[in-house]
Image (tube, rainbow, N blue to C red):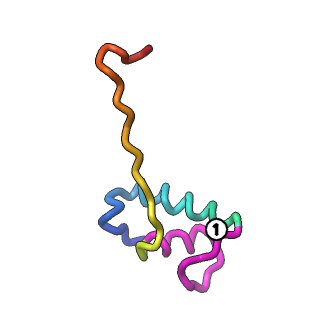
Amino acid sequence: MPKIPENIGSKYRFIIIAAERAKQLQNKARPKVKVRSTKPAFVAIREVEAGLISFEIPQAEQVPEGQEGR
């Protein structure tokens, strides 16, 4: 079971970040950790666990009151 860093805070966010990083690795990005496996998903999980992947949480867009559903 992967160790989820505190700055991520959610196992779902962890998986999304690792999946996006795995896509980058499949598209020839260089790994940031040395591991025996060459599988992009495994490498991505280890990178996220090590805190080597930066990410940004987008803020929800505020809808003015009375404008919902338009």
* In the depicted structure, whether residue 24 falls above or below residue 60: below
Q: Amino acid at mark 1?
A: Leu
Crowding near pointer 1: few (<14 within 10 Å), some, many (20+)? some
* Residue drawn at (38%, 33%) of the image: 61
Task: Please state the horizontal and vertical placement of residue 62, each as a whole percent of the image.
Answer: 34, 30
* Side of 40 relative to 66 (left or right): right
Which residue is nearer to you in this view: 54 or 43?
54
Task: Please state the horizontal and vertical placement of residue 40, each as a whole percent of the image.
Answer: 62, 69
Task: Please state the horizontal and vertical placement of residue 32, each as a whole percent of the image.
Answer: 55, 78
Q: Which residues are the magenta region?
A: 28-48
* Residue drawn at (42%, 55%) of the image: 56
* Side of 41 relative to 12 (left or right): right
Image quadrant in which you'd find residue 31? bottom right
Image quarter where the C terminus lies is top left
* Side of 48 relative to 21 (left or right): left
Image quadrant in which you'd find residue 11? bottom left
Classify mark 1: helix, strand or loop: helix
Q: Is residue 44 magenta?
A: yes
Image quarter where the N terminus lies is bottom left
Q: Is residue 46 magenta?
A: yes
Picture mark count? 1
* Residue drawn at (29%, 18%) of the image: 65
Quickly name the residue at label 1. 25
* Residue drawn at (62%, 80%) of the image: 37
